[in-house]
C-alpha cells in the first residue's frame, strides 16, 4: 500500500497534480453557482423595485 502512495518516487508530483485537478474542478463548479445566485438576487431586487413603481 505504501508503494502505491509513493508512486515510484514521484508521489509529490502525482499527488500535487491530483490536488490541483480537484481544486480546478471545484472552482469550475462553485464559481458559476455563486454567479448564478448573485444574478438571481439582483433580478429579484430589480423586480421588487419595478413592482413598487
Image (tube, rainbow, N blue to C red):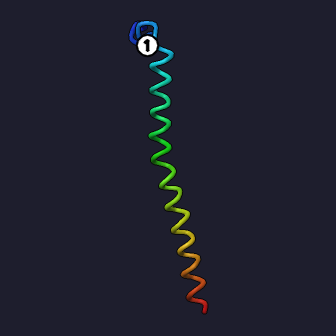
Give above or below for 15 relative to 28. above
Query: Dot 1, how many residues are within 10 Å of its Cα: few (below 14), some (14-19), or many (20+)?
Result: few
Callout count: 1
**Residue 22 place in picture, x, y as percent:** 46, 34
- Residue 28: percent from the left, percent from the top? 46, 46
Residue at the location (57% across, 87% down)? 50
Give the residue at x 49% y 31%: 20
Residue 45 to residue 24: above or below = below
Q: Is residue 24 above or below residue 9?
A: below
Q: Nearer the viewer, residue 10 or 36?
A: 10
Rendering coords of residue 8 (x, y %):
41, 7
Q: Quadrant of the N terminus?
A: top left
Location of mark 1 (residue): 5
Residue 7 position by quadrant: top left
Q: Residue at x 45, y 11 (%)?
A: 10
Quarter where residue 18 is shown: top left
Residue 39, placed above or below residue 5: below
* Disc 1 element: helix
In the rendered image, the quadrant that contains the C terminus is bottom right
Say which residue appears at 54% left-offset and 81% top-offset. Answer: 47
- Residue 21 placement (x, y as % from top left): 45, 32
Amino acid at each position: 500500500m505504501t508503494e502505491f502512495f509513493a508512486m515510484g518516487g514521484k508521489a509529490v508530483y502525482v499527488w500535487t497534480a491530483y490536488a490541483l485537478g480537484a481544486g480546478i474542478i471545484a472552482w469550475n463548479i462553485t464559481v458559476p453557482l455563486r454567479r448564478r445566485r448573485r444574478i438571481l438576487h439582483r433580478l429579484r431586487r430589480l423586480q421588487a423595485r419595478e413592482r413598487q413603481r
